[in-house]
Image: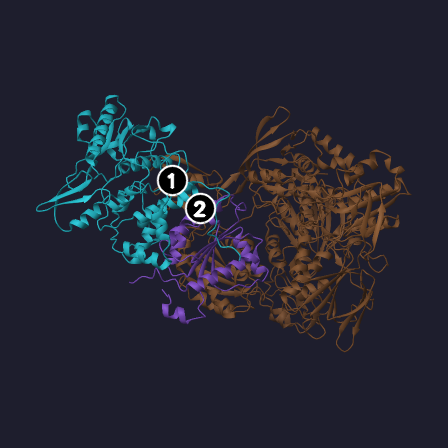
Amino acid sequence: MGIDTENQEIENNIKKISLNLFKENKVDLIIGYKKGTLPLMAQPIIIDKEEDVDKLVWNNLCYVNLAKYLVPRIPKFVDAEKGNLRVGVVSKGCVGRALIHLASEKQLNLEEIKIIGFSCNGVINRQRIEQEIGQKEIREVFVKDDKIHVKGKDFELSFPYEEYLNELCKVCKVKSPPITAELSDVCVGECQEYSSISDDFNDVSDFELKTAEEKWEYVKNSLDICTRCYACREACPMCYCNLCFVDQNKPVWFGKTTDTSDIMVFHLIRAMHMAGRCVGCGACSSVCPVGIDLYLINRKLEEIVKRRYEFTSGLDPKILPPMMSYEMEESEEFMLEED
Amino acid sequence: MEKVGAVMVVGAGIGGSQTSLDLADSGYKVYLIESSTSIGGVMAQLDKTFPTNDCAMCIVSPKLVETGRHQNIDLSINCVIEDVSGEAGNFIVKVRKKSLFINPDKCTGCGVCGRECPIEAIDIFNEKLAKYGATSVKYPQAVPLLYAINREVCIGCGICYGVCKAKAVEYDREDEVVDINVGAVVLSPGFDEFIPEEANLYGYGKYKNVVTSIEFERILSASGPYSGRVLRPSDGDIPEKVAFLQCIGSRDYSGVGKPYCSSVCCMYTAKEAVIAHEHMHQIKPTIFSMDVRAYGKDFDKYIIRAQKQYGVQYIRSRVSSIKEVPETKDLRLKYETQDGKIIEEDFHMVVLAVGLNPPDDAKYLAEKFGVELNQYDFAKTDLLNPVQTTKPGIFACGAFSSPKDIPDTVTQASAAAGCVNQLLYEKKGTLITEKSLPPEIFVRGQPPRIGVFICHCGINIGGFLDVPEVTRYAKTLPNVVMSDRNLYTCSADTQTIIKEKVQEYNLNRVIVASCTPRTHEPLFQETIREAGLNRYLFQMANIRDQCSWVHMNDWEAATNKAKDLVRMAVNKARQIEPIERIKLSVTPKALVVGGGISGMVAALNFASQEYETYLVEKEKELGGFAKHIYHTLEGADIQVYVKELIDKIKANKNIHVFTEAQMENIDGYIGNFKSSVIHGEKKERTEFSHGVVVVATGAKEYQPKEFLFGQNENVILQSEFERLLNETDQIKNKKSIVMIQCVGSRNDEHPYCSKMCCAEAIKNALLAKELNPDLEVTILFRDIRTYGFKEQYYRKAREAGVIFIQYDENNPPKINSDLKVEVLTPRNDKIYISTDWLVLSAGIYSDREENEELAKMLKIPLNDDSFFLEAHVKLRPVDFATEGVFIAGIAHCPKTIEDSISQANAAVSRACTILSKDEIEAEGKTARIDITRCIGCGMCIENCAYNAIELVDDRRFGTVASINQVLCKGCGACSGNCRCSAIDILGFTGEQIFEMITGRI
Amino acid sequence: MTVQTEESKSSNEDWKPKIIAFLCNWCSYAGADLAGVSRIQYPPSIRIVRVPCSGRVNPYFIIKSLTDGWDGVLISGCHPGDCHYLTGNLVARRRFAILNELLQFFGIEPGRVNFMWASAAEGERFAMLVRKATSIVKKLGPNNKFEKKW
């Protein structure tokens, strides 16, 4: 089955489930993706009636993590009289994870949510396509026969789908939203139970072989172009602080400049804040205007909490994230000891 | 006669000071009467204290300052008791306040008179080794800081009168005689050390290099004659070989000294040896002793450390003679080793560990107050209540009743206060005045004006880094408007200076660069509060414990580091703001966990003061381990005593007894606990509120695995032996009994002494001998630790024919199935003894699991041996770091019944300082939340160990965290993880720490 | 900012690193006091910041110390089970474990930031670990990764 057929099936399923949810009056709104006005990007859409269901699409250009619209809830999702509206969220695996993790951080009540799940077949690495195309204007992008077809004014190029997937999608182990016994009412559509996820994290261990100097240089070189526009923060469903640490005063802990030092610190602390929380959706990288791929950092975060605390974010709202819990006996190999 | 809510405390050493503070804090007016010219007693003369090697002056000084400035304590020095009349509840004491010839109200303690006085007089404090003028205070940190003229040597030249700017010198100033009306009296005159007579066999007074332990203590002290260097008096050389001779004037039946054991010499000698070696590594101490009596909490560990870590050598022998080698002034010691060799050895210096005598004025005081003394001229006290003298209403504490160390003295001091409470509780608060503090100066929003006070700490800081340079440097820092240095910033006179400087320079932040805030912050905070500043407008830079003392050989680096530390403190100080402390109400009820003797005594004391008390006992019956004890060594009948206690408790309507009970939960905090207990056969659950907790859970007897115990029925424990002696006549047909001491004590697993076993063994041996005079009793021991007056029973046992054989830890006695005991004597002879009963003196073990559970509930610590760990081993022996929780009895460490009773009364006294108040102030350094930043993720809730945080709905900001200021302990676990920086910890705010980090340059 | 240059790092054997140490009030700070009371000597490299508990130590403190030019950072709390605040050190341990990995991921040398436990009774251990941390940082040389170009 080709990717295009798969996409069609996914899209049909989403539409079918959404229609039922409206019909059975289980949701007031559904948030999903629609065809974008830009060729290389799908757009979020909020629908509140059956007839709009047809606008929903799935096309491997749906980078946005829709959970972002629920923290805080955009005004459209709140009714002056009814309070929080019941929202169905079209959920690829990482959107489902984000919703579940946000519930463990008390940011949303899953009883008001329907996770409209499907088995995601990945999103395109937009950055890479754009780099390949260069300055030329892209008019149309579609996936057909395991190829990504990019059409412009006087060109048409195609790229192998698997290779030009988002890096995180390539190693994704949670394609469908997770479901647990308690969430049977919340997760509709294609969801999956994950008892334990096995991942060798080879990509991360390869990087770990580098010396400190090499790592510093590598990370520095990949981040150096950061303009600190904070698009990554804005796209991230886990970045929902009222006041981000970079904007805090009293004291101003860290510089706001684009000096290497300040950039490194920004990404270091943002990573620290993501520990045990990142759901690996890659939205941060997809939206970066200068093409920084935070993929390795995100993978490292998953790897740390998996190895140390047997934790994968967003699988079960009942399990406390690592920064919210502790054990008496834990590995302390990193601590200074007498010789 | 109506009772009076005032108490007189006679003697202002550490004991008298503690009693005074407890009583003053509980709402009594205290008249503290001291015969010398400053308070602090012997402890103020000590260099370090065992077993922690804490600097004695450093830990006692804040307490003395507090005593000297407490609103409810009326301190009079240079006093004599002239007459006493009245009875318990209402005494009139005539006190003569002898003239100092200097007006105490005018004297500022500036010391000009002392420096100008042309006459040299002997200074009491430095033990004859240094000289000062006739007008002198005792020592630079004296409380109160007043000068006095010694008229015996004064020649009346008038110079001091001329130089005194304060016009305080009054040669014709007369004594003042006052009648003081009090409800009770606590006698704590301390002790005098035994002074060997001149030309006795140790050559003290004849040979310059033979000094007493107290003189040596002064030599060790930084404020002593050689500024802390250990030098011998004859030529100022470093004495490499120093011999310490134990039991000088103690355990002495020759008539020269005293027959009793002075209790403290073994430990203070070990300490002096360790400190001497620490001060000067060349010094190799050798200690000559009979038994090493390290019977207190963690004492044995100290002795082991002294040997292993500091190379202190122990020789078990009594030195027979000392001769000076005329050319070198070295001393030739002659002694017999344990295997019978006579040895002559030269030492550079000899320290005589002199014993404790009753105070010189013991007889005088006893006569005036109408209390009896015992055969050794110490105060005679009740067999089971060691603070009760023979006269009701008059109590004794500290070394006045028997030789004892500091923690025991402090415990007794509080115990005496506890007994006073029992007598006078209804008059509490009738004669006191509220401490009037000036209103707080409003400083918010004003530019910081920082004053820095830098301490020389004698030579402790000034000797290792450039204090003047640090002082100059501090002055250059932004917002620092003054910097000054002091010999001792903690002394009473400096407190006055600080207050003056606050006014003079309009300071709104104060920094002290000295020792550690852990001991001294409260003192300075109190000082600046008295100067009108919020007590949190204070910072300390630790330039002693964490600088001068650890970089003693690098003057420049230490100076630079001190500058950095001062700068970091200044940086932080710029950011500090006043903190308001919240006030809490107090539930005037007590919870006592444990229904043994300690618990029952505590409960009865609370109840007799009309505090409702909950007594929780895990067994079916009250009584605890004491049920197995028949008499004390001194002859008190424990069975009768326990029965009386139980009857009194059952009859007291203020006490709720829960038996077969276990604490389910203890929630809350000082003054406001809420607990639940599961009790009775039916496991009922009861909830109640209370303001304090006394932990008196006791301990258990070790069940030995060694010496065939449990395999041979004639191998029995000391407690079972006691039962057999008291309940049966089986002893009559026995021929031989062998006892083995230290079973399960003082080994690698349990490296502590169980303290009671020696006395128990001797008690039972004496009784067995009495019941069957033909019985052969052999006690196999490592050290016989019959400290204090218990020594007489040791001698009595020897006289009665009890055989004592010492064995070595590494060669314990062996036993075969016919109960034939093989023991290797110190002379390496093997001896075989057949025995009918082998009696094991099993050690006292803590109940680890039980203690851990309670420790967790109360948030209190345990030591390595799972006994509860008090707040401070020297000066807070019944308190925990967790406020409102106190310890009594053998849950703290093995101790005698009398001591347990004392500690129970002491715990009550400490608790009464809380229960007697309607409200108490909470700590101010807690977590605060900025709800505009909080996103209500709940991480802080999960990370808070005290359940102090919950999510609440805020009208403006939605779901946000809310912190209970009273439950919050200010640890900051919540803040450290908060991504939004919504939580800050007052006193350790992000901004303050930021400033310290960035203050690097 | 007075960060030494690479040149002086290699040539200067006498270079003394400056290490900021965040010590919990109840165990490690007391342990440091005990080292003092016991007169145990250790290098004059550390500058101690007293915090109530290792749980108080926010990653910001550590990272800020690095960006501000401290050559090393030392964080010490009570041993697990000893925490005066029961579990503050356990909360801290997870935080430090993760932070430590991230620091190294970003290329901060292992040993630039050190975490340790020391009790109030461990003056000896405290001094010994300070010696060790100092020698590690000394080997690493001055911390100039975060030196700003402008």
Residue nearest the observer in this picture, B558 or B751: B751
In the rendered view, would you say A92 is above or below B518?
above
In the rendered view, would you say A83 is above or below B520?
above
Q: Is residue A220 visible to the viewer in this orientation of the structure? A: yes
Residue nearest the observer in this picture, A157 or A35: A157
The colour of chain A is cyan
For disc 2, the chain is C
The numbered disc on residue A107 is none
Q: Secondary structure at mark 1?
A: loop
Q: Give the chain ID for the purple colour.
A: C
Q: Which residue is mark 1?
A: A198
Can you name the residue that lies furthest to the right here? Answer: B774
For disc 1, the chain is A
The colour of chain B is brown
* Left or right: C142, with B511 as reference point: left
In the rendered view, would you say A299 is above or below B340?
above
Relative image position of residue B999 (x, y in whole percent)? 40, 60
User: Residue flagged by tag 1: what amino acid is it?
Assistant: Ser
The numbered disc on residue C94 is 2
Relative image position of residue B518 (x, y in whole percent)? 54, 53
Q: Answer yes or no: are tags 1 and 2 on the same subunit.
A: no
